[in-house]
């Protein structure tokens, strides 16, 4: 098994199960906030001792007691749950003597203990990202300090790890009586609306192993995302291996606003052109109407909550439609080409232009690059990222002459030197393909499939398809079902 993927199902819980799901989501929020409170209190205690000039040993001890890692946060939360601060009650005997009984967190047994643990893990990751961003070890946008989570009626999530006891797992998909169901610890069997046959067959044949399940509350719906470690794709659907000396077969992929994707070969042959659907723009009038309806309702009222839910459903439809379209485009690219080259776009910088921000966010360039990267990796293909300063649009694909000025309105590239007249996007795609042939790596990855350079700066977020195995790497431990989601070895950091 070499890849990680996720199966997402829409839950159909009963009224009692909905209450239990909400209880678990609230427990995750409560545990996250309590861990953050314990962490801040420990830091404040250390800061107070330092300012008062206390003994050096006491200051060092207070500094060491500040919980930062996942294990220290989990231990601190477990100690607090059974302490007097978490809960106590007063008992009066028949003789009038009052006694204090420490009860701890009385409702902790109503939810799974993994909910508390995973909330502490999430906080540790947030603290690690914050410290790495402050010290300059983490590139990209500055990461803020973790904040307390607010209680809402339309959001919330929690995560459970799969624990195997003998032949029985704590997370199971489907039963003999109800195939369309997911069984979770402390929650029982919950019906799902989609068919689970594909995942059940993969688990039954040993081609998949459940790692964890994330339950998320959306707009009037509950979703479960089952993360599995799956076997490689069948060799029939994988691309054939290329020799190390082969530098041909590259196809450039130019991402744009008018045409979302234009793929071309070095000889200026167009292999694919997909027009941008502009999903957000088409629904902008309805979005404005729904947003005005929310602003006109009284804060805290039931009507405002209903109007907010309608607006949230509209945003969800836009996002799902865009995501489905991008999956179709990425599938079409990786199935028909084994070597793709993408340009390293500074999407963060482009988004700062108020005239282009909406169109760029509607196109989903970063998400498209992320999908192409991991899907091509699954099929044994290659993805190369062209240099950010390579002028793919201004360079003539015939003679190599570079234009000094090329406005966005010019959709046709005309070379002043050789007289080439070609579509602007196709010319850029041909230049990217030619650039890849000149920069094809000769180092193999050990599988005989040639060098692979993956990882767009804009697609450098958490990628569950590239997780390490259990017990490997400096940030994982044996028996841990959720490895750290680290970047691929060849993946570059996010752009600033």
Image: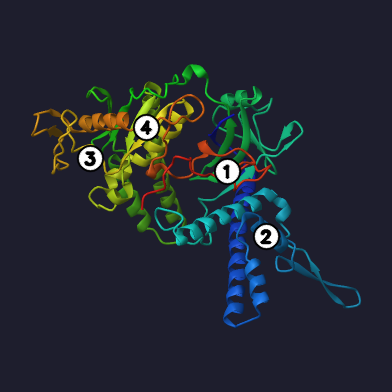
- Contact between labelled residues 1 and 2, with CB atoms less than 8 Å apart: no
Q: Position of residue 33 (x, y in %)?
A: 58, 61
SS category of the residue bearing label 4: helix
What residue lies at 38% left-to-right and 37% top-to-bottom?
369
Give the mark toward the camera: 3 or 1: 3
- Marks 2, 3: nearer the viewer: 3
CA–CA distance in space, label 4 to label 2: 43 Å
Q: Which residue is mark 2?
A: 77
How much space separates mark 2 and mark 3, taking CA atoms? 54 Å
Task: Point out the tag, 2 or 1, that comes first from the N-terminus.
Answer: 2
Mark-to-mark CA distance, 2 and 1: 22 Å
Query: Which of the two labelled residues, at mark 4 and mark 1, occupies the earlier sequence position?
Result: 1
- Circle 4 crowding by C-alpha within 10 Å: few under 14, some 14–19, many from 20: some
Whether pointer 3 and pointer 1 mark residues with C-beta atoms closer than 8 Å, the reply is no
| Residue 300 appears in the picture as rendered | no
Q: Residues within 10 Å of mark 3 (few under 14, many from 20)?
A: some
Residue matched to label 4: 325
Query: Which percent across, then down, holds residue 24?
Result: 63, 50
Quarter holding the N terminus is top right
Residue linked to disc 1: 215
434 horizontally vs 339: left or right: left
Q: Considering depth in this image, is 141 or 454 the residue closer to the camera?
A: 454
Q: Secondary structure at mark 1?
A: strand
Query: Secondary structure beneath disc 2?
Result: helix
Other residues around mark 1 within 10 Å, as few (<14) / some (14–19) / many (≥20): many
Q: CA distance from mark 4 to mark 3?
A: 28 Å
Marks 3 and 1, how far apart at CA: 45 Å
Where residue 391 is drawn, which disc sits there?
3
Q: How many marks?
A: 4
């Amino acid at each position: 098994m070499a890849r990680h993927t996720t199966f997402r199902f829409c839950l159909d819980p009963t009224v009692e199960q909905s209450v239990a799901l909400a209880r678990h989501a609230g427990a995750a929020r409560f545990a996250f906030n309590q861990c953050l409170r314990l962490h801040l209190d420990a830091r404040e205690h250390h800061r107070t001792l330092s300012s008062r000039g206390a003994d050096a040993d006491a200051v060092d001890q207070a500094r060491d007691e500040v919980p930062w890692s996942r294990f220290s946060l989990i231990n601190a939360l477990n100690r607090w749950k059974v302490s007097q601060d978490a809960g106590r009650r007063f008992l009066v005997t028949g003789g009038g003597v009052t006694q204090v009984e420490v009860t701890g967190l009385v409702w902790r047994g109503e939810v799974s203990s993994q909910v508390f643990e995973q909330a502490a893990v999430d906080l540790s990751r947030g603290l690690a990202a914050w410290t790495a961003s402050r010290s300059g070890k983490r590139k990209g946008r500055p990461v803020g300090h973790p904040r307390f989570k607010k209680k809402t009626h339309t959001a919330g999530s929690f995560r459970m790890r799969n624990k195997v006891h003998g032949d029985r797992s704590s997370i199971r998909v489907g039963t003999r009586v109800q195939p369309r169901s997911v069984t979770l610890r402390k929650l029982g069997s919950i019906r799902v609306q989609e068919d689970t046959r594909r995942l059940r067959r993969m688990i039954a044949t040993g081609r998949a192993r459940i790692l964890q399940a994330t339950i998320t509350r959306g707009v009037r719906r509950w979703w479960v995302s089952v993360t599995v470690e799956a076997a490689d794709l069948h060799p029939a659907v994988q691309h054939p291996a290329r020799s190390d000396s082969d530098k041909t077969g590259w196809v450039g992929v130019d991402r744009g606003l008018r045409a979302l994707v234009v793929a071309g070969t070095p000889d200026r042959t167009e292999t694919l052109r997909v027009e941008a659907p502009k999903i957000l723009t088409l629904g902008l009038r309805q979005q404005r109407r729904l947003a005005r309806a929310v602003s006109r309702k009284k804060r805290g009222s039931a009507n405002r909550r209903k109007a907010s839910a309608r607006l949230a459903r509209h945003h969800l439809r836009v996002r799902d439609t865009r995501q489905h379209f991008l999956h179709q485009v990425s599938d079409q690219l990786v199935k028909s080409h084994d070597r793709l080259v993408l340009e390293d776009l500074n999407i963060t910088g482009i988004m700062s232009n108020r005239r282009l921000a909406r169109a760029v966010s509607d196109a989903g360039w970063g998400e498209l690059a992320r999908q192409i990267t991991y899907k091509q990796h699954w099929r044994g293909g290659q993805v190369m990222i062209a240099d950010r300063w390579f002028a793919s649009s201004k360079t003539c694909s015939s003679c190599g002459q570079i234009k000094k000025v090329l406005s966005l309105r010019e959709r046709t590239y005309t070379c002043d030197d050789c007289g080439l007249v070609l579509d602007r996007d196709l010319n850029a795609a041909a230049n990217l393909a030619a650039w890849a042939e000149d920069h094809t790596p000769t180092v193999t990855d050990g599988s005989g499939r040639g060098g692979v350079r993956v990882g767009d700066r804009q697609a450098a977020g958490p990628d569950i398809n590239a997780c390490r195995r259990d017990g490997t790497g400096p940030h994982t431990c044996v028996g841990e079902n959720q490895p750290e989601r680290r970047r691929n070895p060849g993946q570059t950091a996010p752009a600033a």
